[in-house]
Image (tube, rainbow, N blue to C red):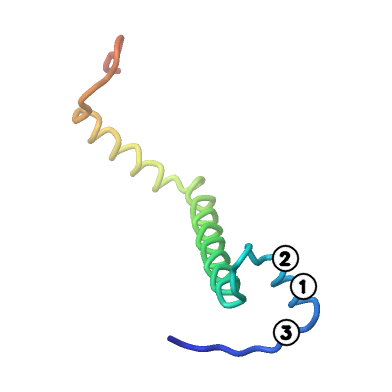
Amino acid sequence: MTHVTFHCDEATEALLDSLARDGESRSETIRRALQDVARLRRREQMRAEARGLVDDAADLAESRAVGADLDPLRAYRGPGWERD
């Protein structure tokens, strides 16, 4: 396990206090905050990737082709289903 020591100013200390849950140590608060930031960063990267794909004609065509290939494998189509 890596140990990290840092000196924080009053504003950072107040921020840590505001982020801490009842009974949570500073180390636990910092660890959880780092995990939260990493999770948020991954989500933002996924959003950016999705925004890039939304207008990608090749990706859309591939997605539709895969859907068409898989459509016959559906187990349940529901009442009134008709093939186009």
Query: Disc 2 vs disc 1: Cβ atoms closer than 8 Å?
Result: yes
Q: Residues within 10 Å of mark 1 (few under 14, many from 20)?
A: few
Give me the disc on residue 67. none
Between the residue at mark 3 and the residue at mark 1, the CA separation in whole angstroms equals 10 Å
The C terminus sits in image quarter: top left
Quarter of the image for residue 75 reads: top left
Give the vertical position of 20 relative to 9 (above or below). Answer: above
Disc 1 marks which amino acid?
Ala
Q: Tell me the SS state at disc 1.
A: helix
Q: Amino acid at mark 2?
A: Ser
Q: Earlier in the sequence, mark 3 or mark 2?
A: 3
Q: Secondary structure at mark 3?
A: loop
Q: Secondary structure at mark 2?
A: helix
Say which residue label 3 marks: 8
| Front residue (pair 84, 36) | 36
Q: Which residue is mark 1?
A: 14
Residue 48: x %, y % from top left: 54, 56
* Left or right for 6, reference 3: right
Q: Is residue 11 left or right of residue 41?
A: right
Q: Report if the CB atoms under discs 3 and 2 are less than 8 Å apart.
A: no
Residues at circles 3 and 1 in contact by the CB criterion of under 8 Å: no
**Residue at the image position 58 percent from the left and 66 percent from the top:** 37
Viewer-proximal residue, 2 or 73? 2
Query: Residue shown at 19%/30% (left/top)?
Result: 73
Q: From the viewer's perspective, is 7 left or right of 27? A: right
The amino acid pointed to by label 3 is: Cys
Foreground residue among 56 and 81:
81
Residue positioned most to the front: 23
Count of all numbered marks drawn on residues in the image: 3
Residue behind mark 2: 18
Q: Return the x and y of residue 24 as percentages of the image width and height.
A: 59, 69
